Amino acid sequence: MTSTSRTLLATAEAQSQAQAEGTQETFQVLCEAALSKHHNLNLLDTVFKAFLMTNVFRGQNYQLRDLFLVKSRRYFKFEHMSIPYLATVFTVEGHDADWLNIKLCNDGFEYLAKPGKPISRHCSDKWVSLPPGNVLPYFTSTVAAAKPYFSSARVFYNVHECRLDMKFFPKDTNTTPAMIVTYEPGYPYMDEEAEEGLLP
């Protein structure tokens, strides 16, 4: 390799490193934006933690391993910051594995554009794939719950649909389904607050 080639290669590597560091720095600034604006990924992590701790289906609390057995669509009541919500849990048979789906409210999380690799999914080209190494540190409770059963994860983000998907891949596909946790807009569950009357 000539000295000119080495110089060009070193310059390209330096530019690539600077770009990566810039992307990571931008991502970190966005994730650490003011909590008053509800733009902090830790907020979503607290939603998942609250779901595991407080979820109830027909009087029973389900731990994560219990949710692996849920097949048909079920609605779990749970509380986040003392506000009741409904989570949707079901399993679909994918071409590569069974997928446990857990759909949670984002509790007012404010979506802002984030740097990431553009990707097309769910009939939309507005998704980006986020580096798990940048995202997962904000999801300490989620990772702690998932780590005994899952070995890796992917993170997808769509600012236009106000949605964040986390896909987890199991250590043992014979005993554990793959899992996708979705955060999307939702509303408190207030049906039980309505007045109830006897039928005439």
Image (cartoon, rainbow, N blue to C red):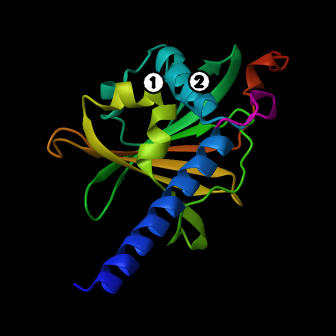
The location of residue 81, given as percent across then percent down, is: 68, 16
Residue nearer the viewer, 20 or 31: 20
* Alpha carbons under labels 2 and 1: distance apart: 19 Å
Q: Quadrant of residue 12?
A: bottom left
In the picture, the quarter occupied by the N terminus is bottom left
Q: Secondary structure at mark 2?
A: strand
SS of the residue under disc 1: helix
Find residue 22 and report its image quarter.
bottom right
Q: Is residue 37 magenta?
A: yes
> Which numbered disc, 2 or 1, marks the residue closer to the eye?
1
Task: Say whether residue 179 is visible.
Answer: yes
Q: Can you identify the residue that label 2 sits on?
A: 77
Tag 2 near tag 1, CB within 8 Å: no
Disc 2 marks a residue whose amino acid type is Lys
Q: Residue at x 31, y 35 (%)?
A: 68
According to the picture, the residue beneath numbered tag 1 turns out to be 141
Q: What range of the chain is rendered magenta? A: 32-38
Instruction: Say whether disc 2 or disc 1 marks the residue closer to the N-terminus.
Output: 2
| Residue 151 shown left or right of residue 117 in the figure | left
Residue drawn at (75%, 42%) of the image:
110
**Residue 189: percent from left, percent from top:** 72, 27
- Amino acid type indicated by mark 1: Ser
Compared to residue 187, the image places residue 173 above or below, namely below
